[in-house]
Amino acid sequence: MKASEFNLVIEAGRTEKQYWQDIWRYRELFYFLAWRDILVRYKQTAIGVAWALIRPFLTMVVFTVVFGNLAKLPSEGGAPYPILVFSAMLPWQFFANSLSECSNSLISNANLLSKIYFPRLVIPTSAVVVSFVDFMISGSILLALMAWYDFVPSWRIVTLPFFVAIAFAAAMGTGLWLASLNVQYRDFRYIVPFMVQFGLYVSPVGFSSAIVPEKWRFLYSLNPMVGVIDGFRWAIIGGDIQIYIPGFLLSLLIVLLVFVSGIWYFRKMERTFADMI
């Protein structure tokens, strides 16, 4: 074979142009990181994957006792209060776990960032996927609750993947922001747990957003998880539950803004990760 048949092309900005193609080329690294994190999370634990069931289940029990039995807050759509709570606990737990995992994902893989080239977006994305695995496992509790209470969802359940996609975008966008900021400012490792705990109480997880006064519902929907949780309940419980459309559209818009801006900011800071980490 003639040497003239080999052409080495050096083109400025070529890596930038092929970035999204590189993500596909490095899909095996993505699979490896995701599978490694799943194994490490439950390695040497006495009950393994059951931890993904225990945490949301115990939280649901506490919220049901406090809000349903003590505060006597109403349910929605004729659903038992535990189903009302757990239909919100699913997206919230996924969102909260994604923030925790994403925020530390780049720091935890500092050795990879400083040694080899690959699209850095692979790392936080794999962290979100690991949290999504927990989400799927936790879904078995919801099925068990429905069987226990003999509750049958309506046709709306077929729309659930749409709301899952919104939850994924919210988790991904916020996670990218926190992952980038945590590399620059290590204080965020302390801020994220506070954000997650605070967000749990300002989101309609233990109660229905319908109890929020009408004049405050649009403002309350500035929390993007309000629209996600309301969508999950609308799809899972059905009945007479209605989505507050103006608030849902506002939450959806915020999710899209966070998702797009998260990718933009992550890509902007990506070149400096190896130096700062």
Image: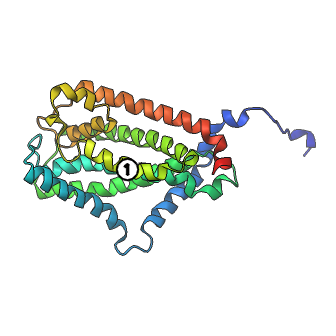
105 with respect to 74 (left or right): right
Q: Can residue 118 be seen at all in this image of the molecule?
A: no
Residue at 20 percent across and 48 percent down: it is 206
Which quadrant of the structure image shows residue 163?
Answer: top left
Q: Residues within 10 Å of mark 1 (few under 14, many from 20)?
A: few
213 with respect to 232 (left or right): left
Q: Which residue is farthest front?
A: 187
Point out residue 164 in the picture as x, y percentages from the top left corner.
34, 42
Residue at 86 percent across and 41 percent down: it is 6
Decide: is 105 above or below 225.
Answer: below
Q: Nearer the viewer, residue 120 or 275?
A: 275
Which quadrant of the structure image shows residue 172?
Answer: top left
Q: Nearer the viewer, residue 66 or 132?
A: 66
Residue at 18 percent across and 25 percent down: it is 215
Point out residue 144 in the picture as x, y percentages from the top left corner.
19, 58
Decide: is 19 above or below 188.
Answer: above
| Circle 1: element type | helix
Residue at 50 percent across and 53 percent down: it is 104
Point out residue 19 in the picture as x, y percentages from the top left corner.
64, 38
Q: Can residue 234 be seen at all in this image of the molecule?
A: yes
Point out residue 24 in the picture as x, y percentages from the top left corner.
59, 44
Disc 1 target residue: 194
Query: Disc 1 residue type?
Result: Phe
* Numbered circles on residues, count: 1
Q: How is the image coloured?
A: rainbow
51 with respect to 62 (left or right): right
37 with respect to 2 (left or right): left
